[in-house]
Structure formats: structure tokens, C-alpha cells
Amino acid sequence: MLVVLLVASLAGFPEIGYAATSVTANFSVNNGTGYANNFGGAVNQLDSPADVDTLRSIGINFMRRDAYLVQIVPNTTVADYKNNVGNVADPSTWNWSNYDWVDTYHNKGIKIMLIMSYNIPWLSHSNTMHG
């Protein structure tokens, strides 16, 4: 029975051929439009205008950077947050001072993907920023 199934399955499938494939690239021609944000990076320390100028001079126009919630959102409790005690639920009252570099990057022509990183301890089950 197994032999019959094997022969039937082999006879039922046509032979598949594979063509040779090659690619030629001419690097002397640059006529592609591409996606503007292809050439970027991910750094967490280059904040000075001179550093950002250096990034732009080598073609960087897009940057992924982290914003750590534990540095931004006030230390409170879930109950106080829900009740907006001390206006804690209003993002305009949060501490954004560590992120002045966002304006520097923007003013120098670099688009930013801001990653809101990790957690705030009072909102996690383990009382840590990693949840």
C-alpha cells in the first residue's frame, strides 16, 4: 500500500525546473527615489548640536531614540493617577527636561521615532520599570 501511495504521489507532481538567476548593479548611477528615512540610526547619547551636525553630514536623516517613562512620569500611585491628584495625569506637568534633544534633532532636520521605553514602577505588578 505504501509503495502505491509513493508512486501515485511522485507521478502526480510535475518535475520542477529552476532557472539560473543573476543580478547586476551599476553603482555609478543614482536615480532611485527610495524611502527618505532608510538611512538612520539608534543612539542614546548624541545630544549636542555639534554631534547632530556630524550625523547630518554623513547623511543621517532619521533616528530612533528611547524616552524612559520612569524619568518623565511622576512617582505616584494608580489611585492618585486616576484621581489626578496634583495634576499627575496631565502630560504637560511631567518632567520632559531630559528630552530637550528632541528639539535639537528636529531643528537640524532629523526625524525621530520616539520609543516610550519600559514601564513606571507604580504601574507594574512587580513594582519595577521592567514589569
Image: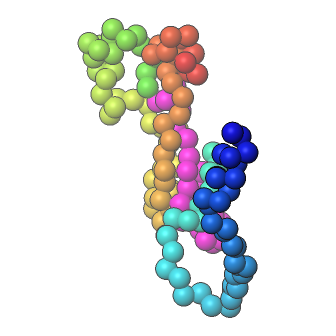
- Position in image of residue 90 (x %, y %): 30, 28
- Pick whichever, 60 or 50, lies toward us: 60
- Residue 86 falls within the magenta-colored stretch: no
Colouring scheme, one of rainbow, by chain, secondary structure, one colour: rainbow
Q: Residue at x 43, y 25 (%)?
A: 73
- Pick whichever, 92 or 5, lies toward us: 5
For residue 18, side relative to residue 101 (left or right): right
Q: Where, by quadrant of the figure, is residue 92 drawn? A: top left
Q: Quarter holding the C terminus?
A: top right
- Position in image of residue 42 (x %, y %): 62, 51
- Residue 63 falls within the magenta-colored stretch: yes
For residue 74, side relative to residue 87 (left or right): right
Q: Quarter holding the N terminus?
A: top right
* Up/down of 24 relative to 112, above or below: below
Q: Residue at x 26, y 12 (%)?
A: 83
- Position in image of residue 71 (x %, y %): 52, 28
How many numbered marks, from 0 up?
0
The reply to whether residue 72 is visible in this rendering is: yes
Farthest residue in the bottom direction? 28
Q: Magenta residues, as a range?
A: 46-72
Q: Residue at x 47, y 59 (%)?
A: 111
Q: Residue at x 48, y 36 (%)?
A: 116
